[in-house]
Image: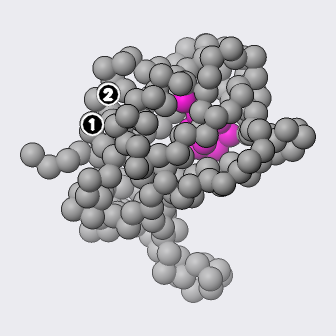
C-alpha cells in the first residue's frame, strides 16, 4: 500500500475558538512569520510571543497570522516522536495560556508536486514579473508525487510552500489523540 499524504490546515469552523495574531519578539515588534514557513530550520534566539487576536476556546493546532502552525505541547511531543528529522519545535508564549505551545516548523522542502495530476498555473512574461517566470503562480487540487516525497512525514513543497503536508501516519496519530483544530485534505 502506498503512503498517503495530507494537507494539514486549521479548522476555522470550530465553534467559539480562539484566533491567534502574528508573533512578536521580546520588544513587542512583529516577527516575520514567513521565517517559520519556508521549509528550513529557523535560527532565532529572541523570545517569541503570540498574542490572542480573538479570545475563545484554545486549540491543539492553530494557524497564527497567515499559516503559522502553533501546537499544544502534547501535539508537539507526537511530532517529535514520529517525525524528529522533519520538524523543529520552536517554543512560544501564547498570551494568557498557562500551557506550553510551540511553533511547528517543517524543516524539509521537497520538489514533489505532481504537475500532471494538479491544476498548475505558471507565471508568464505577460504577468509582468520577469523574475517569477516559470514558477508556480497557483496550485489547485494539489497532488503529491508519492515517490518523490519518499519517507518524509512532514514537509513543505518546493515552489509552493504555503501548505503544510503530513503523512497518513501523522494524520492517524492526530486523530487518535483527538487533537482539536485540525483539518485534513488528501493530496
Residue at (20%, 47%) from the top-left corner? 3
Query: Are the two marked residues, 1 and 2, in contact with CB atoms closer than 8 angstroms?
Result: yes
Q: Quadrant of residue 133?
A: bottom right
In front here: 11 or 63? 63
Find out whether residue 52 is within the magenta segment: no
Residue 137 x %, y %: 52, 68
Q: Is residue 148 left or right of residue 8?
A: left
Residue 73 x %, y %: 53, 24
Residue lying farthest to the left in this orientation = 1
Residue at (59%, 43%) from the top-left corner? 67
Question: Quick check: 123 above or below 75?
Answer: below
Please tell me whether the stretch drawn in magenta is mainly helix, strand or loop. Answer: strand
Give the magenta-colored segment's residue range.
62-71
Crowd tier of the residue under label 2, counting other residues whose Cα lies within 10 Å: few below 14, some 14–19, many 20 or above: some
| Disc 1 element | helix
Residue at (50%, 75%) from the top-left corner? 135
Question: Quick check: 135 above or below 4?
Answer: below
Q: Can you see residue 163?
A: no
Return the mark for residue 173. Answer: 2
| Disc 2 element | helix
Q: How is the image coloured?
A: one colour
Q: Is residue 132 left or right of residue 29?
A: left
Residue 112 x %, y %: 33, 64
Return the mark for residue 169. Answer: 1
Q: Quadrant of residue 148?
A: bottom left
For marks 1 and 2, give the CA distance: 6 Å
Question: Quick check: 87 above or below 159?
Answer: above
Question: Quick check: 83 above or below 148?
Answer: above
Crowd tier of the residue under label 1, counting other residues whose Cα lies within 10 Å: few below 14, some 14–19, many 20 or above: some
Q: Is residue 56 left or right of residue 144?
A: right
Residue at (61%, 27%) from the top-left corner? 101
Amino acid at each position: 500500500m502506498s503512503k498517503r499524504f495530507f494537507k494539514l490546515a486549521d479548522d476555522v469552523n470550530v465553534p467559539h475558538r480562539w484566533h491567534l495574531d502574528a508573533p512578536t519578539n521580546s520588544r513587542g515588534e512583529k516577527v516575520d512569520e514567513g521565517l517559520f514557513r519556508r521549509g528550513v530550520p529557523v535560527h532565532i534566539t529572541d523570545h517569541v510571543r503570540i498574542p490572542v487576536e480573538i479570545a475563545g476556546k484554545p486549540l491543539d493546532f492553530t494557524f497564527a497570522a497567515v499559516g503559522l502552525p502553533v501546537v499544544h505541547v502534547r501535539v508537539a511531543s507526537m511530532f517529535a516522536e514520529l517525525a524528529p528529522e522533519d520538524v523543529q519545535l520552536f517554543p512560544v508564549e501564547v498570551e494568557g495560556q498557562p500551557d506550553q505551545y510551540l511553533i511547528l516548523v517543517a524543516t524539509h522542502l521537497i520538489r514533489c508536486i505532481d504537475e500532471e495530476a494538479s491544476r498548475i498555473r505558471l507565471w508568464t512574461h505577460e504577468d509582468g514579473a520577469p523574475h517569477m517566470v516559470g514558477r508556480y503562480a497557483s496550485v489547485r487540487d494539489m497532488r503529491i508525487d508519492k515517490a518523490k516525497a519518499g519517507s518524509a512525514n512532514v514537509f513543505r513543497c518546493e515552489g509552493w510552500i504555503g501548505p503544510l503536508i503530513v503523512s497518513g501516519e501523522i494524520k492517524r496519530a492526530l486523530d487518535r489523540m483527538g487533537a482539536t483544530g485540525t483539518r485534513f485534505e488528501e493530496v
